[in-house]
Amino acid sequence: MKTLVLLSGGMDSSVALHWAARHTQLVAALSVDYGSKHNGRELAMAGLQAAALAVPHEVIDLPWVNRCFRSDLLQSGGDIPEGHYTDQSMQSTVVPFRNAILLSMACGLAESRGAQAVVIAAHSGDHAIYPDCRESFMLAMAQAMRLGTYAGIELMRPFIAMDKAAIAREGAALGVDFSKTWSCYKGGELHCGRCGTCVERREAFALAGLVDPTLYAQE
Amino acid sequence: MKTLVLLSGGMDSSVALHWAARHTQLVAALSVDYGSKHNGRELAMAGLQAAALAVPHEVIDLPWVNRCFRSDLLQSGGDIPEGHYTDQSMQSTVVPFRNAILLSMACGLAESRGAQAVVIAAHSGDHAIYPDCRESFMLAMAQAMRLGTYAGIELMRPFIAMDKAAIAREGAALGVDFSKTWSCYKGGELHCGRCGTCVERREAFALAGLVDPTLYAQE
């Protein structure tokens, strides 16, 4: 099956890229710059991951998200909150309906490139605070993709039954270089070590029993 | 209910704009330039329709659709076919998953602006050749919008049980100035009078018993 992978440059989607290269006929990776504070850091890593597999890498800018939408994840928003991901404070980092926008773009591009499926790295640990990460949303979106395209594009979620630690183990088995992935929402020189995504990244490596190659600003 | 209307500048969405202004609390109209041959003509009309109602009008460019997607509707595609809309030849004008991309953008923008619903002018005459115009797709997308947002954004389709002639009559009753709407896919100086959308536009006015204010290049 020919596939297109949504690639942010984080841990999960980088593993999804390598998974798709191993198990499907991977035709392209799509990364989107929607104006988040960490998009620049992420996209550099996405480029390295795609290059490592010699996969065509499409990077699309959506400058209007930063201009028109309200979210602290965006450059136009307030500070990124610190603490554990499950904290209610992280709700300020929701970008309204972001995953639907990314999946719609990926689906249209997949059909234009002759692919039959879009791969997204959604997983069981995706957070209740993000409505467009929940499996109920993914099922509805998958239905819209199947019905709204000639090819009946599928939405593949190979990690949906796995947690982030299991994905890290899968990535290690696939030879993913995790030093070339980015998580921190603050998008600074180093991973901050304190925001929700940094806390979660550290936990995943620890739970997976893997060496964490990340240099954190605060240990 | 606060609403946001997807406004192309064609007949149907211009009527939807006036319908929403009459029956809901209309907070914004969204128009998207995705690089079709007729976007320039349409968007000028969309601007006039929004201005007539003093509705905030957001215009967003998606230059990558024209670059990355394949469709004869796009500036990068081949010639627009002529003849009746139902002809199989019109299939070349499908822009893959376009309505999902537009609805996802509208839904995220609606949530950012505090609206509770997105209005789209989908109608019973929308064509079998466009998978993302079918009601089965709209139902799945409506579910994705409801589940993927905090506000549970609704997808309103007030014309879903009407045909284009009925929409024209509704527009006339609402005082829509149809001379300030654009349909022709070719995007020339005048409506060509021969492409699928021109044929359909003419038929709608005739069936509705309305004077067609359009100047066609070919009668």
Image (spheres, coloured by chain):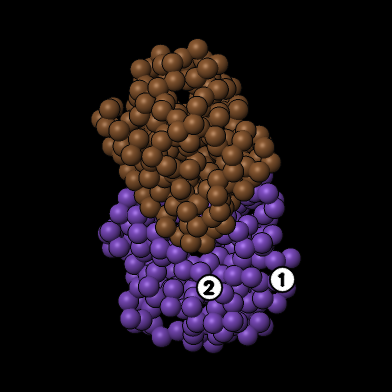
Chain colours: A purple, B brown
Pointer 1 with pointer 2, Cβ within 8 A: no
Question: Residue A1 or B116: which is nearer the viewer?
Answer: A1
Q: Can the viewer see residue A31?
A: yes
Q: Residue at position x 62%, y 42% from top?
A: B90
Residue A41, horizontal then vertical, whole percent: 39, 75
Q: Can the viewer see residue B18?
A: no
The numbered mark, 1 or 2, whose residue comes first in the sequence reads 1
Dot label at residue A57: 2
Q: Name the residue under label 1.
A: A24
The quadrant of the image that shows the C terminus of chain A is bottom left
Residue B32, horizontal then vertical, whole percent: 41, 46
Separation (CA) of disc 1 from disc 2: 16 Å
Q: What residue type is labelled 1?
A: Thr
Question: Residue B150 or A85: which is nearer the viewer?
Answer: B150
Q: What residue type is labelled 2?
A: His
In the visual, does A11 lie left or right of B20? right
In the visual, does A173 lie left or right of B219? right
Examine the rendered structure and indicate whether residue A8 appears above or below residue B83. below
Q: Residue at position x 42%, y 57% from top?
A: B63
Residue B59, horizontal then vertical, whole percent: 34, 46
Examine the rendered structure and indicate whether residue A83 appears above or below residue B179. below
